[in-house]
Image (tube, helix red, strand yellow):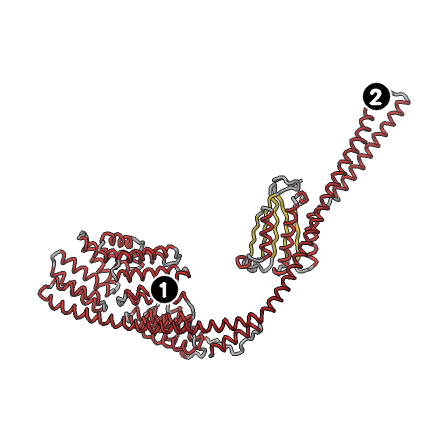
């Protein structure tokens, strides 16, 4: 009923577009000690101080948190603190902290924090080989993540559950769980976790003795790993080689097992970066060599492993290596030494609670000590029965937990279906009520858009008329040039030529008539001179008054923009370029892009200055619009209609463009367009 009321409340808030800020928000009062919690947690990671001191720091943080009054902040820090305790192997403090974190999360009804607390519990118990508790908490985390629809974390938890199931030899269950994890993780493309799912499938099939299937799953895991770019990639690849080698060893293909173990051991610095893993791989290599009968230098190799495992206190590993040394010495007929290593292996297996290894050691005892074979056989049977009963008991417990979980999830799904139906009905009514408002609003938007389009069309028409006028002016100028040329040719050249001939004829005559004629023709030359001077003066004046329509149009746009006094637009252009010689399409589109850019600066940039530059080379014109405004993130804003218009216009004139902008650093748009003259030649020089 509460859920229905909440849904109805949400619906009516949306329907009437009402929003109200909560006045009951919990305010956390800063406190010096509480603020120090993250610093203390960080200090506990400092490996230069002793483990005891680091544990004291975490204990101090925990005691401080217990006194905190803000439960939400307290729950967050408790989870961080519990993880730090886990990393420091402080099991006692971890359990206390995580218990408080879980209880407080339940109290706050915070599903995410509850799930994290269960997750931490599961990892902790698995590390300490308490598999039933690990499984219980993992399943609880999975319930919470499934209920909230968090597929990513639900998939990761399923991988954890699959690993727990394999550890108690519930291989069929582990396989089913790993497949569920894959279904959740594959759509998310989380390749490292997809790789984990395939690895779990491989481990489960190895346990089921389906070795070929196990190898196939490892192959798929490797394919997923190739798409992963994490920092631990090399470590994962080595782990793969080691696991694949295990499968070959279990299959009896010792040669391939040896090849893979050797590849693991050739990794740079593995001996120093992960001594335990190196010793494990070296031990496996030696064991497979023993199985093949390759005993040259084998004893030294096994003793090196023994030394390494002893130096790092790897008790479980010591059980393996002592057992292998016993087998080696038995193969050399040295029964006495074999017995010595067997006794030590048995002790190490019991200390580390590695009962599967202890079973193998007991089997081996019947070989090296036939006189007591009956005793060892009975001990083996007793231990094997108890282990099988324990595993069966745990698997049954897992089945019960799984059954309860399935019921819980099924119930949640049923409730979700009911909520969806109710929400669908409410939304349907809401859509009917709000449809009229949406239609009216859309009509208003359409009218505004239509008006804007009409305005743009009118602007385009005006600009085209201006360009057409420019064409007429150009034709008039050409006509005037032809007239002046004819005037010079017909009026001046003829007079000058006639005067020159007559003066040459009178050059040697000194009579009064000759002098009078000479003065007349000199006068004619003066008249021609004056005519030339007048024509030159008119041409010079016309040249000075020549109208550059494109540049004038851009200048008018700049002046109009500056009249708004929102920012100062600085305009510079190449004066030795005949901009009017450009093709009409280029001038129109460049003008419109400049207009669009200046409008965008006025609306969005908050700039103080905008710099507009027009330059030209032999083959291209270049335009730059740069502002010193607030800038923006290009990837997020690249789909605006203004940007699309610029891209469309540049494409239509076969140009290129570039947009650069960052927050607080302004925006720069650069255009580069191939030059095409009005006469539609391919390319030409624009420079005078």
- Residue 458: x %, y % from top left: 69, 54
Q: In the image, what residue occupies the spot 30% across and 73% down?
A: 400
Residue in the foreground of this view, choosing between 64 and 226 = 226
Q: Is residue 636 above or below residue 468?
A: below
Residue 113 is tagged as none
Q: In the image, what residue occupies the spot 39% across and 66% down?
A: 153
Residue 211: quadrant of the picture = bottom left
- Residue 179: x %, y % from top left: 34, 63
Observer-side mark, 2 or 1, equals 1
Q: Is residue 102 left or right of residue 578?
A: left
Q: Is residue 333 left or right of residue 74?
A: left
Q: How many marks?
A: 2
Q: Is residue 363 above or below residue 682?
A: below
Residue marked by disc 2: 505
Residue marked by disc 1: 181
Q: Few, some or many C-alpha atoms within 10 Å of disc 1 (few <14, some 14-19, many ≥20)?
A: many
Helix, strand or loop for disc 2? helix
């Amino acid at each position: 009923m509460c859920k229905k009321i909440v849904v109805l409340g949400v619906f009516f808030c949306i329907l009437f577009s009402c929003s109200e800020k909560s006045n009951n928000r919990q305010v956390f009062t800063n406190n010096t000690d509480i603020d120090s919690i993250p610093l203390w947690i960080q200090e506990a990671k400092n490996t230069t101080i002793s483990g005891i001191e680091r544990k004291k720091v975490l204990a101090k943080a925990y005691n401080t948190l217990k006194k905190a009054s803000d439960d939400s902040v307290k729950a967050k820090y408790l989870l961080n603190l519990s993880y730090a305790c886990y990393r420091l192997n402080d099991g006692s403090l971890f359990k206390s902290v995580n218990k408080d974190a879980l209880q407080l999360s339940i109290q706050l009804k915070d599903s995410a924090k509850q799930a994290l607390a269960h997750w931490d519990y599961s990892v902790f118990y698995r590390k300490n080989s308490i598999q039933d508790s690990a499984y219980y908490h993992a399943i609880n985390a999975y319930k919470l993540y499934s209920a909230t629809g968090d597929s990513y974390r639900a998939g990761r938890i399923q991988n954890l559950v699959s690993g727990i199931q394999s550890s108690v030899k519930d291989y069929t269950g582990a396989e089913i769980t790993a497949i569920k994890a894959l279904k959740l993780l594959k759509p998310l493309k989380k390749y490292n976790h997809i790789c984990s799912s395939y690895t779990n499938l491989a481990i489960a099939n190895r346990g089921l003795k389906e070795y070929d299937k196990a190898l196939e799953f490892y192959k798929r895991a490797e394919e997923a790993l190739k798409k992963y770019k994490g920092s631990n990639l090399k470590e994962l690849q080595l782990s793969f080689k080691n696991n694949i080698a295990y499968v070959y060893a279990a299959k009896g293909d010792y040669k391939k097992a040896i090849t893979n173990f050797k590849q693991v051991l050739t990794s740079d610095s593995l001996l120093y970066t992960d001594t335990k893993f190196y010793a494990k791989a070296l031990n496996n290599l030696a064991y497979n060599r023993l199985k093949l009968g390759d005993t040259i230098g084998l004893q030294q190799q096994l003793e090196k492993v023994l030394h390494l495992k002893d130096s790092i206190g790897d008790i479980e590993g010591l059980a393996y290596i002592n057992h292998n040394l016993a087998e080696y010495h038995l193969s050399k007929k040295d029964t006495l030494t074999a017995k010595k290593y067997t006794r030590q292996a048995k002790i190490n297996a019991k200390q580390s609670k590695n009962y599967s290894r202890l079973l193998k050691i007991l089997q081996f005892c019947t070989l090296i000590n036939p006189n007591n074979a009956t005793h060892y056989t009975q001990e083996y049977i007793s231990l094997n029965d108890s282990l099988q009963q324990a595993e069966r008991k745990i698997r049954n417990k897992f089945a019960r937990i799984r059954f309860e979980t399935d019921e819980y999830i099924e119930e949640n799904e049923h409730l979700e279906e009911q909520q969806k139906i109710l929400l669908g009905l409410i939304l349907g009514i809401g859509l009917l009520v709000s449809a009229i408002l949406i239609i009216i609003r859309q009509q208003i938007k359409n009218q505004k858009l239509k008006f804007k389009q009409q305005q743009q069309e009118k602007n385009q028409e005006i600009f085209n008329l201006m360009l057409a006028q420019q064409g007429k002016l150009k034709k008039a100028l050409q006509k005037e040039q032809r007239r002046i040329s004819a005037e010079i040719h017909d009026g001046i050249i003829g007079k000058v030529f006639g005067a020159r001939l007559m003066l040459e004829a009178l050059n040697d005559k000194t009579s009064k008539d000759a002098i009078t004629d000479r003065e007349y023709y000199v006068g004619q030359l003066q008249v021609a001179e004056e005519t030339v001077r007048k024509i030159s003066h008119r041409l010079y004046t016309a040249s000075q008054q020549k109208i550059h329509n494109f540049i004038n149009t851009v200048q008018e746009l700049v002046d109009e923009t500056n009249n708004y006094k929102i920012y100062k637009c600085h305009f510079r252009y190449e004066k030795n370029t005949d901009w009017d010689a450009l093709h009409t399409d280029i001038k129109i589109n460049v003008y419109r892009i400049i207009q669009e850019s200046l409008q965008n600066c006025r609306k969005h940039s908050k700039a103080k200055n905008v710099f507009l530059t027009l330059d030209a080379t032999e083959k291209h014109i270049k335009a730059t619009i740069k502002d010193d405004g607030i800038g923006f993130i290009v990837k997020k804003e690249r789909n605006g209609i203004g940007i699309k218009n610029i891209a469309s216009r540049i494409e239509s004139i076969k140009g290129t463009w570039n947009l650069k902008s960052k927050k607080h650093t302004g925006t720069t748009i650069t255009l580069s367009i191939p030059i095409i003259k009005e006469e539609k030649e391919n390319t030409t020089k624009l420079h005078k």
